[in-house]
Image (cartoon, helix red, strand yellow):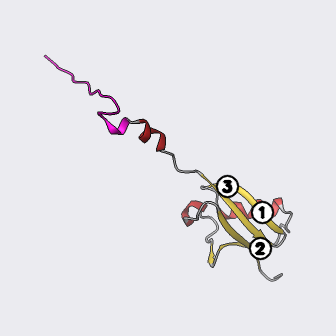
Amino acid sequence: MLMVLIASGSPVDRPELSETNMSTVHPPSKTIQLEIATPKGPFKGEFSLTTKVSEVIDTVKNTLELPKDASFELWYGDQRLAPEERPLESFHLPNPAKLTLVATGSGV
C-alpha cells in the first residue's frame, strides 16, 4: 500500500508563505536609467541591462544628431566603459547612473 503525505499549513505555520514574504520579493530590475552628459547637452534614457555600450552610444548620437562619423567613448567617472561590446550589466553601474559621452579621435 502506498501512502502519500501532503504538506499543508497556514502562513503562520509556514513563514515562507506569509503575505509579508510574498509581497516583499521583487524581481531585480532589468533596465537602467542613464543620465549622460554629452557635447550637445544632457541625454536621459532607460536601457535594458543587456544593451551593449556601443548601442547606447549609437542611440545618443542618433537622438542628439551628433555627427555619425564622429568617435565617442562612454565613461562612468574615471572608468571607461570598454570594450564597447560588453552589456551595461557587466559594469555593475548604480541605477540610475550618471555617465559622460566623450568625443575621441583626430577631431578633438
Q: Is residue 64 above or below residue 26?
A: below
Q: Name the quadrant containing residue 88.
A: bottom right
Q: Which residue is mark 2?
A: 71
Q: Is residue 47 above or below residue 27?
A: below
In depth, the one of 28 and 88 nearer the eye is 28
Say which element carries label 3. strand
Characterize the magenta stretch by its predominant secondary structure. Answer: loop
Q: Which residue is mark 3?
A: 47
Q: Nearer the viewer, mark 2 or mark 3?
A: 3
| Residue occupying the point 64% across, 68% down | 84
| CA–CA distance in space, label 2 to label 1 | 17 Å
Amino acid type at circle 2 is: Ser
Q: Which residues are magenta?
A: 1-17
C-beta proximity under 8 Å, tags 2 and 3: no
Q: Which residue is mark 1?
A: 43
Amino acid type at circle 3 is: Phe
Which residue is at the far left?
Answer: 1
Q: Name the quadrant containing residue 38.
A: bottom right
